[in-house]
Image (spheres, rainbow, N blue to C red):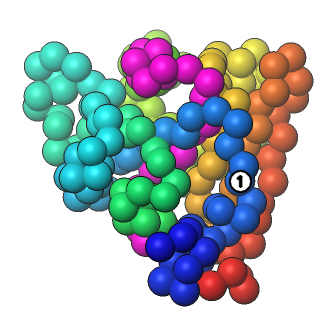
Amino acid sequence: MTVESEFASPAAVAFARAVAPRAPLYAILDAARESAGVYQARQAGLDCQSLYAGPLGDMLQEAAPYLIEFAPTSPFAAWWFAQWGNSIGILAEAPVRFQELRDHLRTLLTVRGEDRKRYYFRFYDPRVLSVFLPACTPAELDRFFGPITTIYCESAAGRELATFLHPPNGPMLHRSTSLQGTA
């Protein structure tokens, strides 16, 4: 079955038409929103690891964010795009190994508020990310993206594919691709 078959979701078709990855793709899954994703990834034989480690990782394994290798034609990808509109996570394109990206993403899990307290940061939630990224300074974008070149996620209640590109030494670019008429 190809991505553009009659059985593919509109999100999968739009992604296949709009995205030509130049680097490995990774999913960052919010298991708190959809715990079946970890099982789906492991069933597809994909590398899948929680972003939390140690005792906290053990305690939060049911609700943790997970980094998952993403192959666009895998059964996991079909499952992922069938969940489109449920804000289960984001996709990232990064020319680095799995562990290097995981290490970077782990640095983003907490932020310090104006009150100097630490808070968990749900950057992997498309609803949070789409508000956060446009408000960032260039230096904040550099720190957030790190080795990531492009982030893909749903927007407009799942009716669009949002793409955030962050070229080296350049401003972030954002575009949205409508999913209407792609099925």
Residue 131 among magenta residues: no
Placement of 138 over or under 17, stated as above or below: above
Using the image as rendered, state which of residue 80 and residue 51 is in the foreground: 80
Residue 70 position within the rendered picture, expressed as x and y whole percent measured from the top left: 46, 45
- Identify which amino acid the numbered label 1 is placed on: Val
**Residue at the extreme right:** 170
**What residue span does the magenta drawing correspond to?**
82-103
Residue 124 in the figure: left or right of residue 67: right
Horizontal relation, residue 16 to residue 42: left or right:
right
The location of residue 156, given as percent across then percent down, is 65, 68
Tell me if residue 22 comes above or below residue 178 in the rendering.
Answer: above
Compared to 5, does 91 lie above or below? above
Q: Is residue 147 in view?
A: yes
Q: Quadrant of the C terminus?
A: bottom right
Q: Which of the 4 quarters of the picture holds residue 127?
A: bottom right
114 left or right, relative to 174: left
* Residue at image point 74% right, 72% down: 178
Q: How many other residues sit within 10 Å of disc 1, few (<14), some (14-19) or many (≥20)? A: few
Q: Residue at x 47, y 73 (%)?
A: 1
Seen at 54% across and 70% down, the residue is 2
- Left or right of 163 in this view: 107: left
Residue 135 can be seen in this image: no
* Count of all numbered marks drawn on residues in the image: 1
Residue 63 percent coordinates (x, y)? 23, 44
Residue drawn at point x = 11 percent, y = 28 percent: 58
Q: Residue furthest front?
A: 1
Q: Which residue is mark 1?
A: 19
Instruction: Classify 15 as above or below 101.
Output: below
